[in-house]
Image (cartoon, grey):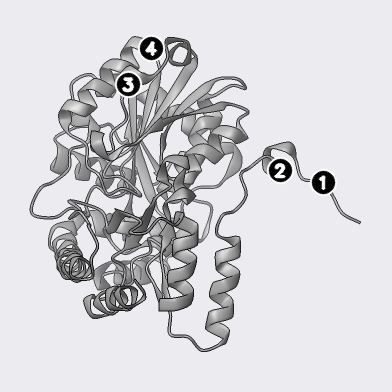
Amino acid sequence: MTFPLADRVRDLPPYLFADLDKKKAALQAKGINLISLSIGDPDQPTPAPIVEAMGTAIRRPAYHQYPSYIGAHAFRQAACDWIERHYRAAFSPEEECIALIGSKEGIAHFPLAFLNPGDIALLPDPGYPVYNTSTQFCGAVPYYLPLRAEHGFLPSFREIPADIAARARILFLNYPNNPTAACATRTFFAEAVAFARAHRLCIVHDAAYMEIFFDNERPPSIFEVEGARDVAIEFHSLSKTFNMTGWRIGFAVGHQSLVSGLAKIKTNVDSGVFTAVQDAGVTALTIAAPTVESIRASYQHRRDRFVDRLRKGGWDVAVPKATFYLWTRVPTSESSTTFVTRIMEQAGVILTPGVGFGAHGEGYVRFTLTADADRLEEAADRIARVL
């Protein structure tokens, strides 16, 4: 007996990487030494003080019971202190902050609170796939905003038709950006806030990569712009900042009605973040400065060596100012998927095809810096030999 999938699942776009995963498994079965530069998952361990804090917290019997739905006060206070310390924006831990089981979970649940069937969400293209999936799960309609190189991979609000803007309820933004590694300016955020106020929609800013920046140029928070507090919610993740992807912890800050709307969804679908993990998160956010500086320095070293080796191999690649991604055009006339498949089969290097992030990602590939510098240089050399 088989059971039909719900329309919302059946109508999702096909999983682009299914065929690539099969080919990857086949190569691994043959003993091929693959270098994976496709997944944005830090390869370094979580800093020791955070692990030690978890070890202490997990032994507390009180933490073995259900946690707070919205997060322990100590964690929310640490999160608000972090935002104020780095971006000079003050938020109430009681009303304007919520703990998340990773920022992906919060972003995926947020549209359930604010989108009705037929509403429109404005999505970046290319963009993180969860924006599209969560919009469609609500029965809402995604409208894609092209991110083009000539515009610095920033969407143009002037190109949005008036009837689309009138029906839009959410604008998704993500800077520093995955997959393009682009950074936004305060001027751009001011334009976004003005657009949101004019059309009475809210801004969801995915800020997962804000602490992975280079050359001492810290990207701005949307809350550094006047008026953003009236229309925005910003999602932060400890995953990339502290090498904690497996821990599943993040937080969101923003307008009280947006935070409380998300909280209403979460109280009905999950039971919050394990309190011991939140204790470890407090440690991360409290001891952050030297730890994060060390992580940033490691990625910057990798970036510099990898970009140099790729350029020697004939790639025209821009130097990213943030994130641990490189986004560059396919150097041949092949589609991004065909190129990535060929490089995997002939060079043993796994990349991500740009089309996996949306139609406007076609013609690009994404590299990650989540391998040590020697391994990255080896990957560049392997690819150069194939090309």
Compare marks 2 and 1 and give the one earlier in the sequence: 1
Instruction: Name the kind of residue labelled 4 in the image.
Output: His
Q: CA distance from mark 4 to mark 3?
A: 11 Å
Mark sitting on residue 4? 1
Quick check: 251 above or below 193?
A: below
Q: CA distance from mark 2 to mark 3?
A: 32 Å
Q: Residues within 10 Å of mark 4 (few under 14, many from 20)?
A: some
Instruction: Name the kind of residue labelled 1 in the image.
Output: Pro
**Residue highlighted by disc 2:** 10
Q: Residues within 10 Å of mark 2 (few under 14, many from 20)?
A: few
92 horizontally vs 250: left or right:
left
Residue, x 28% and y 31% (percent of image)? Answer: 92
Dot 2 and dot 3 residues touching (CB under 8 Å): no
The secondary element bearing badge 1 is classed as loop
Residue 370, quarter of the rendered image: bottom left
Compare marks 4 and 2 and give the one earlier in the sequence: 2
- Residue 299 seen by the camera: yes
* Whole-percent x, y for residue 373 in the image: 22, 75
**Residue highlighted by disc 4:** 199
Dot 2 and dot 1 residues touching (CB under 8 Å): yes
**Residue highlighted by disc 3:** 157
336 horizontally vs 196: left or right:
right
Q: CA distance from mark 1 to mark 4?
A: 39 Å
The secondary element bearing badge 4 is classed as helix
Which residue ends up furthest to the bottom in the rendered image? Answer: 31
Select label 4 or label 2 by which is in front: 2
Q: CA distance from mark 1 to mark 3?
A: 40 Å
**Image quarter (top left, top right, bottom left or bottom right) of the C terminus:** bottom left
Instruction: Name the kind of residue labelled 2 in the image.
Output: Arg
Compare marks 2 and 3 and give the one earlier in the sequence: 2
